[in-house]
Every structure is written in C-alpha cells, then in structure tokens.
Image (tube, helix red, strand yellow):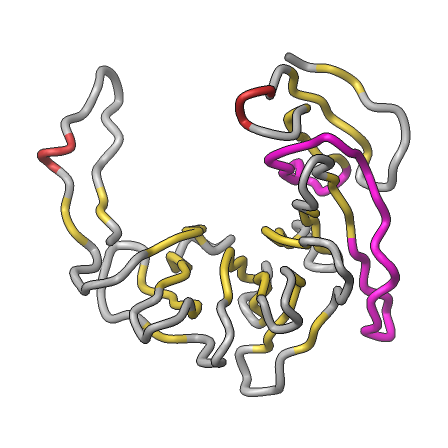
Amino acid sequence: NIWSVPIPASGSVSAESAVPLTTSSQVVESMRVSPDGRWLLYASNLEGHSDIYRMPIGGGPSERLTSEPVDEFAPDLSPDGRTLAYHTWRTGTRDIEIKPLDGAPAQLVTDSPGQESYPAWSPDGRSLLFLDQTPGSNSIYVLRRGTDGRWAPAAELADSALSPAWSPNGASVAYVVGVTAQDAREIRIIPATGGPERSVF
C-alpha cells in the first residue's frame, strides 16, 4: 500500500508518523506524481492483475484508469493532463502504450521483442523517454511525436544505462551508467537529441 510521511526541514523523520493513503489488499508499484502536483499515479493488482490508478496527492478516492486483462505498470501523465503513458505486457513483452483520458482507445507506440518500459513524458509533451530492459544491455530511447500526431521510430540515446530523467527544460537527459543497480558507478548527461555525453558524478 501507499503511505505518506512529511519531509522535515532538517533531520530525519520516523516512519511511525506515516499516514496510509491506501488500505486495500494489493501490491502497489511504480508510483509517480503528475506534473501539476495534483495526482499520485500508481500500478496496483487490486483487481487481480496490474492496472493504473490515480488518486489526489493528499489522499482520497482512487480512480481506475485502465481495465485491460493484461498487466500495466509505470504510469506517467502528460504535462497537459490528458494522456497516460505506461508499459504493458499486451504483446508478451514490455511495450509502451498511451491512453487518452477522454475515452479514446489506447495506442501501442512501441512493439518489438525488446523490453520497453518506464516511459516519461518530456516537459513539452511531445516526446517519451523510456528504458529498454533487455537483459544484459539496458538502453535509453526517445520517441518523438510529429505535428501530425504520428510517432517516429525510437532513437537510442545511450546503452548500459539506468534511471533516465529529463532535465526541466527537456534539452537533456540524465542517467546512471550501469546495467544493474549493483554496477551503477557514474551519472552522465546527454543532449535529448543525441550527441556527446558528459560525466557529472
């Protein structure tokens, strides 16, 4: 379940002060806050398989956003709050799917034998950053949507990478060098359009 605890201005905080936001018999994964700070999005197996839910950031009733018979994980809401991105097992491997919240059908935006996962919208809502978790060679990719609404083929930014994240202006991507958390050893930044990387830690 999901618990909330305030972050103090200094010092540490005890988990004893945490407040439950959900209380059902479920496994919750892949939490993320919406860009406007209003919603907490998460994946839960409350209905027997993993679906995407959202709830007000301070707690309250949950809203189920997906109800397919396949598992969906790692939700991210677009900056305009209109489209949900997540990865799904619809094809037998992880693929990135987007779902408009106005009731329009979901759309697969990747469909490959790879393990495309953990999509993240760019600050302008025109691109998706994701991780291909193919065993032994994690890679970071960017998907870009044209003015006609069509998605171009994914472009690889870096391999042997973990935990990619957009910069606030969307011009670059930060990531951890490594294939597993155990061998992570460096943080780098690369332009979102590709190009020379630089080490920052």
Q: Residue furthest top?
A: 201
**Is 198 colored magenta in this rendering?**
no
Residue at horizontal 63%, vertical 33%? 162
- Total count of labels: 0
When asked about the image quadrant of residue 144, the answer is bottom right
In the rendered view, tell whether residue 18 sits above or below residue 119: above
In the rendered view, tell whether residue 25 sits above or below residue 114: below
**Is 150 colored magenta in this rendering?**
yes
Residue at horizontal 44%, vertical 51%? 30
Q: Position of residue 101 (x, y in %)?
A: 53, 78
The foreground one among 48 and 96 is: 48
Residue at horizontal 62%, vertical 85%? 105
Residue at horizontal 21%, vertical 38%? 5
What residue range appears in magenta? 143-171
When asked about the image quadrant of residue 83, the answer is bottom right
When asked about the image quadrant of residue 60, the answer is bottom left
Q: Quadrant of the C terminus?
A: top right
Horizontally, residue 95 falls left or right of residue 69, namely right
Q: Position of residue 167 (x, y in %)?
A: 66, 36
Horizontally, residue 195 falls left or right of residue 166, namely right
Q: Position of residue 23 (x, y in %)?
A: 16, 60
Q: Residue furthest right?
A: 195
In the rendered view, tell whether residue 180 sits above or below residue 156: above
Q: Position of residue 81 (x, y in %)?
A: 54, 66
Q: Quadrant of the N terminus?
A: bottom left
